[in-house]
Image (cartoon, rainbow, N blue to C red):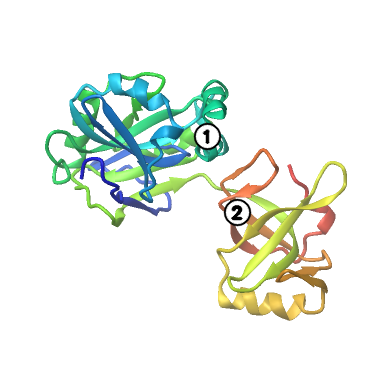
Amino acid sequence: MLFTPVKPMLLTMGKEPTNHPEHLYDIKWDGWRILIHKQGNRIEAYTRHGNQVTNQFPELQEALSHINKHTAILDCEGVVLRNGNSVFEDFAYRGRLKSTEKIRKAMITHPVTFVAFDILATDKPLLKETLIKRKQYLKDIITPSNVLLATPYVIEDGQTLHTLTKEKGMEGIVEKPLNSLYHLDTRSPNWLKHKHFKRLDTVIMGYKENPFTMIVGSTFSNGKLKPVAQVEFGFNPEDKQAFRGIANRLITKEENGVFWLEPLLCCSTQYLEKTSKNMLRITSFKGFLPEKKVEECVFT
């Protein structure tokens, strides 16, 4: 398992968290899932898809001295923190860099922190240890620093943490049973992510098939209507049928598989966050807004 790509255990989308006395709750950080492998002075990092990304993050060399164990495999989220919040776009920028010189400069403008939330092994596998024991192992072997830290957690009081992270504009929280084991390459129905989604009233500007996708937009302060998202999820068959019946009469042109429409229809779009380029990230359809006027769908 050491220095070999492994597929980590994944989460399932939850609804509202409960205050379960046998559950553990920690912060849902927004970056890339990174597994750090360490043995002696050797350290390597892999994404959840098995890509080796060690050279893209020189911060790992500093992290070596903060792992107080000869051998360890840590399950982490790689993040760039801004005022205590993780910014996905900033970490994704770091992940795209290949040039040594650009990476060196980005270490100053986009410094990376690896937030560890689980441990798969030390000098022995820990997959069959309970989560609460693995959390203790993690706490014992990490010296917190700017490049590596173990995420804090609470037991039972998930609703308070959920409210706190929402107030601070964070992505959400994670809920797991204290006695849960670690199963590689598994999406667990008992490991839940509770995200803080938002909604925006948007204009349907176009659509495409295979897969069915709506292109939605908003009116900006300069009065222009611009696309803000391509929405693939949240539609049921009735939504699609009703939409196609109306959209066929509104098509203005077809271009590269996109049917552009006269902007007369509005819908509610759920999203996780807005990017610096004014696009919505992690979106889903939440219903038509037949009474909504296009000019009221403003990007706020």
Where the N terminus falls, by quadrant? top left
- Does residue 128 appear left or right of residue 107 in this picture? left
Q: What residue type is labelled 1?
A: Arg
Q: Measuring 46% from the left and 41% from the top, which residue is drawn there?
A: 172
Mark 1–mark 2 Cα distance, whole angstroms, equals 27 Å
Who comes first in sequence, dot 1 or dot 2?
1
SS assignment at label 2 = strand
Q: Nearer the viewer, mark 1 or mark 2?
A: 1
Which is more toward the observer, 157 or 228? Answer: 228
Q: Residues within 10 Å of mark 1 (few under 14, many from 20)?
A: many
For residue 270, the mark is: 2
Q: Name the residue under label 1.
A: 94
Above or below 151: residue 174: below
- Does residue 291 appear left or right of residue 68 in this picture? right
Q: Which amino acid does label 2 sit on?
A: Gln
Which is more toward the observer, 155 or 231? Answer: 231
Q: Measuring 63% from the left and 50% from the top, which residue is drawn there?
A: 199
